[in-house]
Amino acid sequence: MSTISATTWMLVALIAIIAISAIAAWNLVQTRRTERLRAQFGTEYARELWKTHDRSRAEKKLEDRWKRIENLHIRPLTPRDRSCFIESWRMVQAQFVDNPGGALAEADKLLEDVMATRGYPTDEANFEQKVADISVEYPSVVEHYRAAHSLALLHARGGASTEDLRQATIHYRLLFEALISEPIEVRARMAS
């Protein structure tokens, strides 16, 4: 039997150390990626994970959302636009008393206008794409958008009560308030 030389053992040990270090580095990168995406997307991260049942696929989808938004050139509202939108929202709220369904439709239209002015694509018929776009900078209110949309669809089918319409308007208002203010903390977090 031949014996393995000390040099060969050292070479094997070095290769093992390099392999273990590479695996540890890869795990660290993945952990940081997960932490960053969880922090950025909040409950939207959990929602995507629940839908896909696969952490890597969920994280890939969320990173794809991020890349899409980076290419859209989202911009803040001018003070004049912000003032006009706030006044329009006041009119929506005033209309609710006499025409809740009409106010809900106007709220939805106003949100589309705000989104378009900010640079979000609104011509797409795919509501989930709009939600995905909004979720990058506004993960804490994106569920309100989904809830309002769901109640608006219920209203369109004739199944929404006045209380449902009131709840939908509240959900729209929360998204509206987020969209008219600049998400400074989100932008700072995304830059780091």
Image: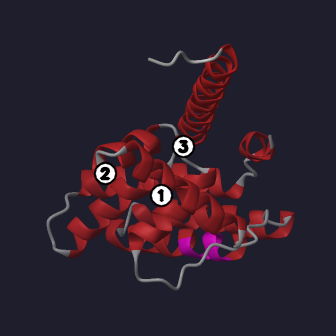
Q: Which residue is mark 3?
A: 41
Q: Which residues are magenta?
A: 112-116
Query: Which three-letter amino acid code belongs to the residue tagged 2?
Result: Thr
Q: Residue at x 31, y 51 (%)?
A: 52
Q: Which residue is mark 2?
A: 52
**Mark 3 or 1 closer to N-term?**
3
**Mark 2 or 3 closer to N-term?**
3
Give percent across and percent down for residue 181. Answer: 72, 52
Q: Tags 2 and 1 in contact by the CB under 8 Å rule?
A: yes
Q: Which residue is mark 1?
A: 61
Q: Is residue 113 magenta?
A: yes
The local crowd at label 2, few if under 14, some if 14 to 19, many if 20 or more residues have their Cα within 10 Å, is few
- Secondary structure mostly seen in magenta is helix
Residue most extreme to the front: 1
Give percent across and percent down for residue 97. Answer: 39, 60
Q: Secondary structure at mark 3?
A: helix
